[in-house]
Image: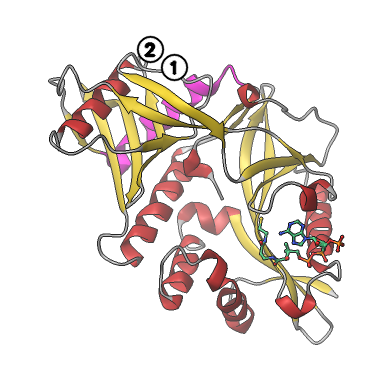
Amino acid sequence: MNVVVADSGPLLDRVLGLTYDIWNEGLTERAYAQWYRAQIRTPWGRQHLQRFALVDDAGGLLATAKRYRYRVRLDGRFGWMAGIGAVFTPLPHRGQGYASQLIERLLEMERRDGVWFAGLFSEIGTSFYERLGFAAVPIDEVTIRVDRKAGAPAMLVRVGDDRDLPALEEMHRVRSSSVRLALDRDRSLIHYALSKKRMLAGLGPVGLRQVEFVVAEEGVSAVAYAVLHGNANGWTLEEAGDRDPAGARLGAMLQVLVAREPSAPMPLIRAWWPQAFPVPPQLALTDRSAARDVFMVRPLADIAMPEKAEDVFYWHSDHF
Ligand SMILES: CC(C)(COP(=O)(O)OP(=O)(O)OC[C@H]1O[C@@H](n2cnc3c(N)ncnc32)[C@H](O)[C@@H]1OP(=O)(O)O)[C@@H](O)C(=O)NCCC(=O)NCCS
């Protein structure tokens, strides 16, 4: 048995064909394949995302997983997290240890490359990954209530642009600096996260999804921003930033967005709201619950892993 890269040729076709039913996100089979191929061609994806497969001696697929490399800041030092995603074993091969073996072999490769820890978002509860040495770290999901009483504040909100990315990077760096674990969200990663969502919306049926990237600016630079992803169920605030320590510009920006449709009922807005991010005066966070996909980590080096929600600064944008 071998672990091989599965990002091209018939092996990738097979993986995409088999995983389509689970992770299609409402796309056609063709669009689902295009979406993955486009992700690995983005500037960040080319360097940080690969799909691997455990294959038998004849090259037959036994199990597959994606492996991301995220630069992280943990307890004030910079290192790497291996993000493991889309772990999958074809039905006839399940229950024979192939997924476990693929994960162990990938993590051994990661450890040898100096990666500090592995992280994943489990869609199947915690037991399978606990057996592999992973432990859950809570991430809070909340509903955002926007105070509509004051109406739309007089504030210029414009569509965000690539030229805003350095300002977004800086807002994230400052805001997350007091938290034990955060991704090092440089402009390239922010660009990837935005592109991934936009491509998903663009490849899907018309009207199924929308992505909005809006900024508030002062002078020529963005001083607050929000990325929202909407579908029939409502909106997700994927990520946000504000140079104002109270977050008042972000709050005003959301008031502006909500005021575009004054007669419509308040849309449901959900977010993974980092505890270290201030709650703007115009907003209330309600219905706090654990995120549906469970964030789990396993150390690959001699490091102390975060354990509590307050230890982690993580936006839904970076869910993988
Ligand atoms: C989860 C999955 C990858 C496991 O693959 P596998 O090669 O059968 O895994 P292994 O043989 O290494 O381990 C099998 C064990 O995992 C357990 N397991 C499988 N699916 C599970 C699930 N959904 N929840 C909890 N445990 C599960 C099995 O019960 C089995 O336990 P046992 O050894 O006590 O019988 C496979 O079931 C799969 O492809 N599922 C669909 C895709 C998916 O949900 N992936 C996970 C995304 S986070």
In primary-sequence order, the first of circles 1 and 2 is 2
- Name the residue at 78% across, 53% down: 128
Q: Which mark is residue 97?
A: none
Residue 165 highlighted magenta (yes or no): yes
The stretch of residues the image draws in magenta is 160-179
Magenta portion: prevailing SS class: helix
Q: Residue 89 sits in which quadrant?
A: bottom right
Whether 195 is drawn above or below 91: the answer is above
Whole-percent x and y of residue 250? Answer: 31, 24
Residue 176 lies left or right of residue 266; in this view the side is right
Q: Residues within 10 Å of mark 1 (few under 14, many from 20)?
A: some
Residue under label 2, please give it. Answer: 246
Mark 2, ligand 1, within 8 Å: the answer is no
Q: Residues within 10 Å of mark 2 (few under 14, many from 20)?
A: some
Whole-percent x and y of residue 164? Answer: 31, 35
Q: Residue 22 sits in which quadrant?
A: bottom right
Asked which secondary structure carries label 1, the reply is: loop
Residue 204 lies left or right of residue 310; in this view the side is left
Whole-percent x and y of residue 235? Answer: 35, 42
The three-letter amino acid code for the residue at tag 2 is Ala
Residue 97 lies left or right of residue 278; in this view the side is right
Whether 316 is drawn above or below 232: the answer is above
- Name the residue at 83% across, 37% down: 301
The three-letter amino acid code for the residue at tag 1 is Pro
Residue 54 lies left or right of residue 244; in this view the side is right
| Cα distance between the residues tagged 1 and 2 | 6 Å
Label pair 1/2, CB-CB below 8 angstroms: yes
Residue 221 highlighted magenta (yes or no): no
Q: Residue 218 sits in which quadrant?
A: top left
Residue under label 1, please give it. Answer: 278
